[in-house]
Amino acid sequence: MDIRWFVVLLLALISIYFIYYFVIQIHNEQSISYEQFIDDISSAKKVFILMDLRNSSNLRSTIMQCSVGLAGSIDLAQKNVSAFAIEDNICISEKGNMTIGECEKIFSSGVLFHIKESNSTQFYRNKIIIGIRNKNASCSVSKK
């Protein structure tokens, strides 16, 4: 085997490793505990509340009420809280409409509360996905 083929093969393997590490691994979020998420909130300066209204015809008002409950939580009182909504493929904020990708870039600078119709709630580093499954759901944040 020629040394050039060996070098090309080695460079290809290194490229595949970096693609996996920097592209695939970044999007594979690791779950964390509620307590770890509360620690993230404690150190965050910005908090984003996202009302995901896609596919939520029966629970739209509950999702919106949940966002109001979160915004009024005592543990978020000293934070810079901004509200967003996703409807269809548009992200809506107080500054106007933008793409979902543009909103996601904004969310990366703080802690995100993503509220949507779902059967479960999941905690991630700097992000919680709050699943709303019935009209009696309530939302708040506390250190327990």
Image (cartoon, helix red, strand yellow):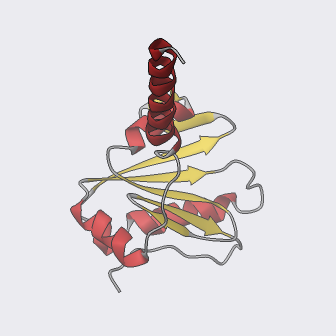
Q: Nearer the viewer, residue 34 or 139?
A: 34
Compared with 92, 83 (above or below) is below
- Tell which residue pokes out farthest to the bottom in this image: 144
- Tell which residue pokes out farthest to the front in this image: 1
For residue 122, which quarter of the picture?
bottom right
For residue 138, which quarter of the picture?
bottom right
Q: Residue at x 69, y 65 (%)?
A: 118
48 left or right of 116? Answer: left
Q: Position of residue 101 (x, y in %)?
A: 52, 32
Compared with 82, 136 (above or below) is below
Compared with 12, 68 (above or below) is below
121 left or right of 21? Answer: right
Q: Position of residue 136 (x, y in %)?
A: 66, 78
Q: Position of residue 129 (x, y in %)?
A: 54, 61
Q: Residue at x 58, y 70 (%)?
A: 121
Q: Nearer the viewer, residue 29 or 129?
A: 29
114 left or right of 39? Answer: right
Q: Residue at x 30, y 73 (%)?
A: 74
Q: How many numbered marks are there? A: 0
Q: Residue at x 39, y 38 (%)?
A: 106
10 left or right of 45? Answer: right
**Quarter of the image with the C terminus in it:** bottom left
Look at the image and tell me whether residue 73 can be seen.
no
Look at the image and tell me whether residue 139 can be seen.
yes
**Quarter of the image with the N terminus in it:** top right
Q: Position of residue 107 (x, y in %)?
A: 41, 44
Compared with 132, 126 (above or below) is above
